[in-house]
Image (tube, rainbow, N blue to C red):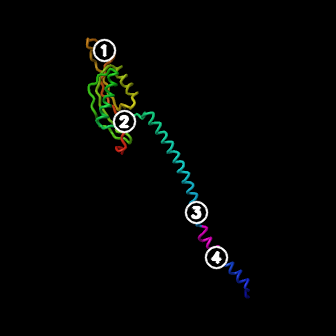
Amino acid sequence: MRLGATGSKLLALLALAGFAGLIWAALLAPAADWQAAQLREREALTTKVTALRATLSRLESEQQQLDQKGDDSGLWPPAPQGQSTARIQSAISASAERSGLAIRSISPTDGQTLALAQMVSFLIEADGPLDAFHAFFADLDGQNPALLIDNATLRLFDRPAPDGTAPALPMLFAQIQISAPVALTNEAKP
């Protein structure tokens, strides 16, 4: 059976259509699917970037508000080690003076470095009546920047008043370990 000119043309047209279908199935359809997947991924990333920009904007405005209000983090401002030690020691001495405690000695001890702060620590030896210690501890509790009591050893002792009479309140001797968190500068953060 012989095909005529029209049949050959039709057969050639069908072969060409089949060949085009194979190319579509083998190459173009996967490429179109890949492009659609890339567009979906791009949209998802664009949404993520938009959310991150909104978060960044919110955090920047919060930072500006905190900068305007001042620091209430409880951290002492960053300064050279000697300057920080002197400021903290001065605050402890002032608190003891306001409370009526007699400080025998204040000596710096080793402090540890945390993620955002360097702890500056002191060992304090003091004596005074019980109410003076109460006032001292209450004053330390309300400090900002913070002064933290790490350890305290209190001992009761009998010491007569200067006139020889017994004191109205018990007299105490104390060794108190106090630490103060000093903010690290960006260069000093671990």
Q: Residue at x 28, y 35 (%)?
A: 82
Provide the residue designation for mark 2: 77
Whichever of callouts 1 and 4 sits on the residue coming sooner in the sequence is 4
Q: Quadrant of residue 188?
A: top left
Instruction: Measure the alpha-carbon separation of dots 3 and 4.
Output: 23 Å
Q: Residue at x 32, y 24 (%)?
A: 96
Q: Do the residues labelled 2 and 3 touch (CB within 8 Å)?
A: no
Label 2: how many Cα within 10 Å (few below 14, some 14–19, many 20+): some
**SS state under label 2:** loop
Q: Where is residue 144 in the image (x, y as percent from the top left)?
A: 40, 30
Provide the residue designation for mark 3: 35
> What's under tag 2, amino acid-wise?
Pro
Q: Do the residues labelled 2 and 1 touch (CB within 8 Å)?
A: no
> What's under tag 3, amino acid-wise?
Gln
**SS state under label 1:** loop
Q: Which residue is drawn at 36% across and 36% down?
A: 77
Vertical comparison of 159 with 118: above or below = above
Instruction: Measure the alpha-carbon separation of dots 2 and 3.
Output: 54 Å
Q: Residue at x 38, y 41 (%)?
A: 116
Q: Where is residue 36 in the image (x, y as percent from the top left)?
A: 59, 61
